[in-house]
Amino acid sequence: MSISPATTAAPPAAPAGTHPTPAKRPRYWTARKRRDALIFLAFALPNMALIAVFTYRPLIQNMYFSTLDWTLGAATATNVGLGNYIEFFTSADAPTVLGTTAIFTVATVGGAMILGLLVALALNQNLRGSTFARAAVFSPYVLSGVGVGLVWLFIFDPTYGVLSWVLRGLGASSPQWINDPNLALVMVIIVYVWKNLGYCAVVYLAGLQSMPKEVMEAASLDGASGLRRFFSITVPLLSPTTFFLVITSLLSSLQAFDIIRIMTPTGNGTNTLIFDSYLQAFGAYNRAGYSATISVVLFVILLVMTVFQLRFVERKVHYS
Amino acid sequence: MSTLTDRPLSRKNLAVTVATGYIPLIIATLIVFLPLAWMIISSLKNPGEIVTTTLKIFPEHASADNYVKAATKVPFVRFFANSVLVTVVAATIKCVLAVLTAYALVFIAFPFKRVIFILILVALMVPPQAAVLPNYVLIAQLGGLNTYWGIILPGLGTAFGTFLLRQHFLTLPASILEAAEMDGASHWRRLWQVVAPVSLPSIATVALVTIVTEWNDYLWPLIITTKQEFMTLPVGLTLLSNSDSSAQAWGVLMAGSVIVIVPILIVFAALQRYIVAGLTQGSVTG
């Protein structure tokens, strides 16, 4: 409003002296840039906002919640600082939950990968029907964990389950899969391996098919036996695939929830980090602050693994 | 194919092929199919054929009684409709958002585009399970408990679809867009008339993977719904399994499992190429 004539006149004068046609081009580009930026936001902002609110905000809020002694649903909470962390790491919870998570993760990842590799070797022979078999073994991976969990719970039923009939046929009696904490964990692991081995098999198959054929043929001509070729050529050449599978399977088994929840609803030897975090908040205790603490611990573990993975991927890109 | 024809057809080779090829393949396929077949067979049995001391593999008179019982014990038809509704709405919105975001990231100039992309990529690695409590508190405050929007909204942001489509859009030849650019077509028209039509297989991949994920989604609907009228199938199945823990209930529970599993099996059987490609993305390229 109170701009003096001197200041408004000055800016156009300066560039006009340096270039013959200066004013038009920059203004055209800024207008276009501004329009492009607006279109960009119109296209991408809804998704970016959703990710910010429902993925990033919870990470930060969990850290705040983890400092509270707070019953879910209660209007008030007391700040306990690091009290929840101290409780988690000094009580029996840390060894139990971290131990269960470690056993569950290593067993499901290892089991699915080893069996997946064996299936991939069979699939790789391109026999008649192997396309069908490939789809068939992959299919459990896309099925509802709740449905799959119930089907297996019936199979494991100590009195009327198929497994109990088989065991009785062999002269043994069925163990109490659900009541025994150790066996409950074994049961859940078996089901996850069943569900995930097809994924590992298909990824391994892609790895096998991208392997140079000449190497195999040369080794074969040298008279190396099948087993020898497998361990000294196939396995080393597959190591990038193996690494990819270790990382993706570790990440997904640290997030495994559905089957554990449906097969052991209140947790009995199956309290992994994610499941225990759920039980603390939404189970009998409604301990929201403590649940958030366990989520933060899980997140830190996932973060370390992700950083590790990103570093490796970067290295791989540089080398290839 | 090649390995078979390369080998001279002798009795020894045939035996080796059967022992190392067919037998493992058949075993692997059976391990996958037997539990699912058992689910279907059991869902057709009457309680007396399940709670028995003499195992019979096939039901004497296959009947749909268990399905009827599942639908009368709990509102199973409603659960099914809810699952269809949530899956269709969520998958549609997610696909549109993924296409729009990926197009913007690849074809529209914007400052800090790379930073935005990295933030989306990192979101891909954040487990949704660890975000459940804060999201529950927020949605509950907004009045979203036992509502459809409360079930759908928090999962709508899509890092997976954006990432997959961005990778695909980057591979499109510049020439196909240049013609549209010369015509002065807007970004909106370029997206839907040029980029989307040539990217249909990738969009189908994202759509199918999203449909499968939404259909199977469990933890979030489980905590956000307490009223039966809003429950999706996996949550309703949990309710069914809680309502009767006796051995009599296995037939009904298997019927419920069939309802949640078989639709996805059918979709998978028809379109497995896209689904497998989408879910194993990144494995070959590293």
Image: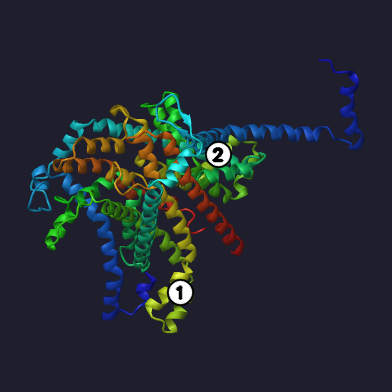
> What's the residue type where badge 1 is placed?
Ile
- Looking at the rendered structure, the secondary structure element under dot 2 is helix
x and y, in percent, of residue B281 in the image: 47, 53
Separation of residues labelled 1 and 2 (CA atoms) = 43 Å
Q: Is residue A20 visible?
A: yes
The reply to whether discs 1 and 2 touch (Cβ–Cβ < 8 Å) is: no
**Residue at the front extreme, as displayed:** A90
Residue at point 21% right, 35% down?
A: B243
Q: Is residue A47 above or below residue A131?
A: above
Q: Nearer the viewer, residue A10 or A23?
A: A10
Q: Is residue B92 visible?
A: no
Q: Quadrant of residue A194?
A: bottom left
Q: Is residue B163 left or right of residue A225?
A: right
x and y, in percent, of residue B195 in the image: 55, 43
Q: Quadrant of residue A175?
A: bottom left
Q: Can you identify the residue that label 2 sits on?
A: B101
Q: Nearer the viewer, residue B116 or A63?
A: A63
Q: Is residue A45 left or right of residue A154?
A: right
Q: Can you identify the residue that label 1 sits on?
A: A233
Q: Chain for mark 1?
A: A
Q: Is residue A282 left or right of residue A77?
A: left
Quarter holding the N terminus of chain A? top right
How crowded pointer 1 is (Cα within 10 Å; few <14, some 14-19, many 20+) is rated as some
x and y, in percent, of residue A60 in the image: 53, 37
- Looking at the rendered structure, the secondary structure element under dot 1 is helix
**Residue at the bottom extreme, as displayed:** A222
Residue at point 54% right, 45% down?
A: B122
> What's the residue type where badge 2 is placed?
Thr
